[in-house]
Image: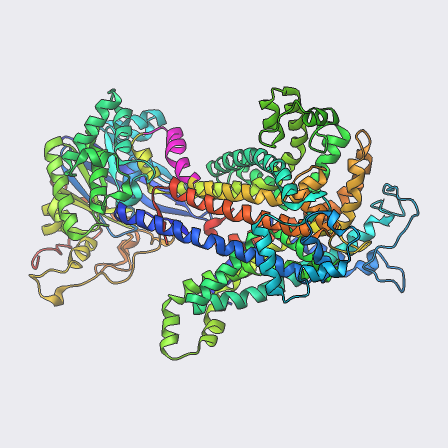
Amino acid sequence: MLEPHGDCGPHGAWFALMIFYILRRLLFLPLTLFGISLLIFLMIGFLGPYQRLATFINSPERLKGADVDKLVELYGLNDPLIIQYGRWLKNVLRGNLGWSYVGKEPVLSAILKRFPYTLELTLFAAIPIIFLGTSLGVLAALNHNKPLDHGLRIFAVVGWSFPDFVFGLFVLMIFYGTLGWFPPGNLSVWAEEIVKSPHFRNFTGMLTLDALLNGRFDVFLDALRHLAGPVLTLTYVEFAFLLRITRSSMLEVLRKEYVRTARAKGLDERVVIHKHAKRNALIPVATVSGQTVIGLLAGTVIVETIFNRTGLGSFIALASQQLDYASIMGGSLFFGLILVIGNLCVDLSYALIDPRVRLE
Amino acid sequence: MREETRKALRRLFSNASGVLGVVLLGLFVIVALFAPLLAPPKPGRDPYFMPVVTWSADPLPPSREHPFGVAGKRDIFYGVVWGTRTAFRIGILVTLASTAIGLFVGSLAGYFGRILDEILMRVTDVFMAIPFLVAAMVLTTVLGTGLDKVMIALIVFSWMYPARLIRGNILQVKEEQFILAAKSLGVSDTLIILRHVLPNAIFPVLIQASMRMGSLVITAAALSFLGLGAPQGYADWGALLNYARNWMLGGYGATFKYWYMIAFPGGAMVLFVLAWNLLGDALRDAFDPRLRW
Amino acid sequence: MKEPVLLEVRNLKVYFRNDEGLELRAVDGVSFTVPPGKTVALVGESGCGKSVTALAILRLVEANGRIAGGEVLFEGKNLLALSEREMQRVRGKEIAIIFQEPSAALNPVYTVGEQIVEAILLHQSVSREKARALAEEMLHLVGIPEPRKRLNEYPHELSGGMKQRAMIAMALSCRPKLLIADEPTTSLDVTIQAQILELLRELQRQIGMAILLITHDLGIVADMADEVVVMYAGKVVERGTKYDIFKRCRHPYTLGLLRSVPRLDVDENALASIPGFVPDPLHFPEGCRFRGRCFLEDETCATEPPEVALGDGHVVYCHHAALSEVCHGER
């Protein structure tokens, strides 16, 4: 793990440690991914061979008229699990994750098509979460034990206690059902037609960005309107943690001697806080922000389902409801991959932000 | 009782939000205990299944007969009352089981260290790599619906947190003088863990368990909300909220009249989770004043 | 005889409130003066209120504490009556401070140069380039090798002694008239301690600032101070010249403090410490606060001890000053 520390000796040794740490993490990355695939495979291994057949078939045509028992034999679904795992892994590494009933296409392409929508939602939610979490956290720390601090605490702990599906339903009821502002889905019907038309080029798969790149400001606004509800939900449910971390980090830094040094220099309190205290306080917050954003990906399972959005989260939810095992396996594997790589990036970037980081 | 513990408990009860948490939890305990009186089940039927009270699929607003209204042909009040028992059952059983497993694994990893520690920690990495909700979803789909299946899935994917906590505590305690002293006297490893290490780690574990209770109940309800957890008609807050979903998506202009479908089961959930979070918060403040808020 | 005065602290009181809302009188009526260009040592055990006094002079007491009374006169103007903005012009420019723990006192995320330049730009109207040149000059002055390179280094890249030198450079960059040094060498190795003290003395000669030296180390006092103020439990018990304190001290506490220093030239058996413990600030005794530990104690000590002037600025706060010719002889 990474730990900030005051004194870590000469620069060269620090650099060597850093390299060692990165290498170690990179070495463990495939191991962790291997573990995830094994775990998911073993869970699915509880199922009978017929149910597992789906994870090997790449298109429904191959099932037509075929003798299912023969197929089970063909794919060796009665072999020992370890052999089956090896075979499955080989398929996965080739990019063959099976056929998705829910998506009516191969699992991999279904995932890759939906992932940009989920990424877009996550990124849009990250902005208010990070902004509100850090700025309100600093505000609470500066008003330590005053009414504003207590008020923010109540606001945060209530938000934290709201299950996302409860808050999401309220948002849907008020902002869609009653006010008609934030409709469910990804786009309105008219905008969907434009996006699907041949003139509209898909650059990133993210609707807001593609709309801007195509110069369709109306489509952009429509996509934003559809994002508002889920973003609002994720924000209120998730910002509390960041607020807490920021607040306690800021309180800790405000007690530090270098803050007193800054005051003793004759600096204005504003400069003391914004230049000297905040910068130090936000270093640990940066890591937590990264983890929060990665964690948001999982939150999309519920939020996308409630707001009827197409995306990776609702894809997995739908697959689970319809017992589409190939999609479940592929989707959870993909989620694990994103999370592990994302967390690695966050940890490594932490080492770059903080000049004092000591590596263990 | 040690002086520290007494002080901490005094701090806990002088903390307004901690008291609020305890009071809220007390109310929920009362509701759970007196469920058969508050919402009498039909004789001869499993009380955990909400009886069907109307033939129309349309929700009915609160009335004298159905004080919280009717959703999915079932009485919301009945579901909220008996759902309290479901929530407690899931929360407590899953927390106990995962904490027990976590204690065991964490003690092994922390105490024996080295290769065993490395292996066990990499295993926790793997279990933590898949998001909790997604992992629980996968396992419940494989195991099939039913509350017991949900609980198994939640246990399988939540033992890592107490395990890591215990391991960290043990690593810390291990360096302390009295452990070295005990070891030099030839006291056995098991005895050292039981006598010295676990008592020192008990409060952090309790605090963490209380904080985790909320997220466990939310995840279990989320599974039911997605239609993966409790079977059709089971008294569960998440399942009740599932009835509301389609009515909320049914076009705008008129959905506000279905407010009771969300407000009562949703309110119960929020208060339940809030109670545990307040309690966990207050416990943490009481035992670790540095982090107070 | 009236000597010139740079800083005069009059009856200063700093009270804190603890978590249970009880009041701690950490500094309770402290008075002393600092003449220009001289070194005054503020001596006492940890927790006696000497560091709080130092912070109170700059009005930097923590949020849970407040200055409850008294005056801090700097060149005749009362610092406690200034507006916050006026006070900011005093801090760093007229009065600078260095702390005990240089690794904690420097901001870890800014380079050493950035932190010195910031102080210079704040109080002097010079360009950024000029400020950098001045900062480099300061680092050179405090004996840091390769000052230009060090400007661009972060605090964690310097050793403890170098960090304290950098702190001193920062504090003196605006040529203050008074430097408060709060246990400046406590956290450093003994050999480094001597270097830093020598540096302070040398800089005092060059710049001509007065030093208020806060320490618990009587060796440093003997080495550095012109005048000494002895504090115990939030009050001054005795003050005078170095000679007064070391050779003619009249307060039983001062005597105990002097006797608790091991010396090679005195028989080991004479090494004595003061019986008992420093009282808890919540339960300071009424009257003389040294009650309960003092060998001269009698019932008169239950009332506030009088200020007894012994001439030439030597003052002792004790009921028994007349009979406490206690320090002569063996010292």
- Magenta-colored stretch includes residue A280: yes
Outermost residue on the right side: it is: B55
Going by the image, does A292 lie left or right of B37? left
Q: Give the range drawn in magenta.
A: A267-282
Residue C49, image x and y in percent?
29, 46
At 63% from the left and 46% from the top, the residue drawn is A161
Location of residue A261 with respect to A27 vertically, above or below: above
* Front one among A278 and B110: B110
Going by the image, does C139 lie left or right of A100? left
Location of residue B138 with respect to C140 vertically, above or below: below
Residue A308, image x and y in percent?
72, 37
Tally of numbered tags: 0
Tell me the colour scheme of the image: rainbow
* Front one among C308 and A235: A235
Going by the image, does C241 lie left or right of C180? left
Q: In which quarter of the image is residue B9?
A: bottom right
Residue A73, image x and y in percent?
70, 62
The answer, for residue B92, to whether it is visible in the render is no
Main SS category, magenta section: helix
At 46% from the left and 41% from the top, the residue drawn is A285
* Front one among C326 and A306: A306
Q: Quadrant of residue B177?
A: bottom left
* Front one among B285 and C165: C165
